Image (cartoon, rainbow, N blue to C red):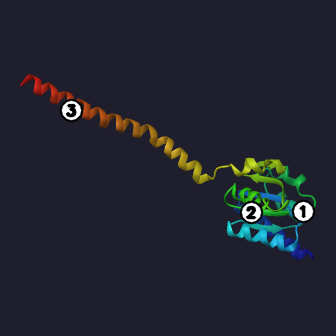
Amino acid sequence: MNKADKAAVVESLKEKLDTTSFFYITDASTLSVEKVNQFRRMCFDKGIEMKVVKNTLAIKAMESFPEEKGYAAVYDLLKGHTALLFTTNANSPAKVLKEFRKTNERPLLKGAYIDTDVFVGDDQLDALTTLKSKEDLIGEVIGLLQSPAKNVVSALKSGGTTIAGLVKTLQERSA
């Protein structure tokens, strides 16, 4: 790989890192080509982009971002065989990894970068599968905000029928 090719890979990674808040770092080193292709297909079906990269080029791309991004925490994970899984949904790569590993021992999860938080190690896979997506969280917040309003409206409605019933009973008694 010549200098121009390396620069192109670094630029491609920078662009990907700039547009994605979530990526997973995996090791699929002992998988056969057939199994890697099967895993790649599963990722593609779920909207996950898998890139096999040189660790030094990935670090070089990450170093171009400000320290606030927190990429320095993943540098130690970029050793050995590495595949990056880029996604727009924080938990989908974890779910795909878990599903694929029902019949295979790899790929192993080296770590995950989730919006400046870093989850290190394969033991984090269960925690990552339970992460809620942004849409799920927004839905829950909206539900929580609507809940008190619904309670007030239903109380007013039930109270209205109760008051109407009392007024009608009082009118019947007085007549």
Q: Residues within 10 Å of mark 3 (few under 14, many from 20)?
A: few
In x, y percent, where is residue 118? Answer: 79, 49
**Circle 1: residue type:** Asn
Cβ atoms at labels 1 and 2 below 8 Å apart: no
In x, y percent, where is residue 37? Answer: 80, 73
Which residue is under mark 3? 164
Taking depth in this image into account, of 6 and 55 the one nearest to the observer is 55
Write down the quadrant of residue 163 in the picture: top left
Q: In the picture, which quadrant includes the C terminus?
A: top left
In x, y percent, where is residue 104? Answer: 83, 62
Which residue is under mark 2? 86
**Circle 3: residue type:** Ala
Question: Compared to 25, does 32 lie above or below?
Answer: below
In x, y percent, where is residue 18? Answer: 73, 61
* Distance CA(mark 1)–CA(mark 3): 74 Å
Q: Residues within 10 Å of mark 1 (few under 14, many from 20)?
A: some
**In screen coordinates, is 141 left or right of 90?**
left
Q: Secondary structure at mark 3?
A: helix
Q: Residues within 10 Å of mark 2 (few under 14, many from 20)?
A: many
Taking depth in this image into account, of 88 and 29 the one nearest to the observer is 29
Is label 3 or label 2 in front? 3
Taking depth in this image into account, of 14 and 81 the one nearest to the observer is 81
Which residue is under mark 1? 55
Q: In the picture, which quadrant includes the N terminus?
A: bottom right
Write down the quadrant of residue 53 in the picture: bottom right
* Distance CA(mark 3)–CA(mark 2): 61 Å
The numbered mark, 3 or 2, whose residue comes first in the sequence reads 2
Examine the rendering and report whether any part of residue 128 can be seen.
yes
The numbered mark, 1 or 3, whose residue comes first in the sequence reads 1
**Circle 2: residue type:** Phe
Write down the quadrant of residue 96 in the picture: bottom right
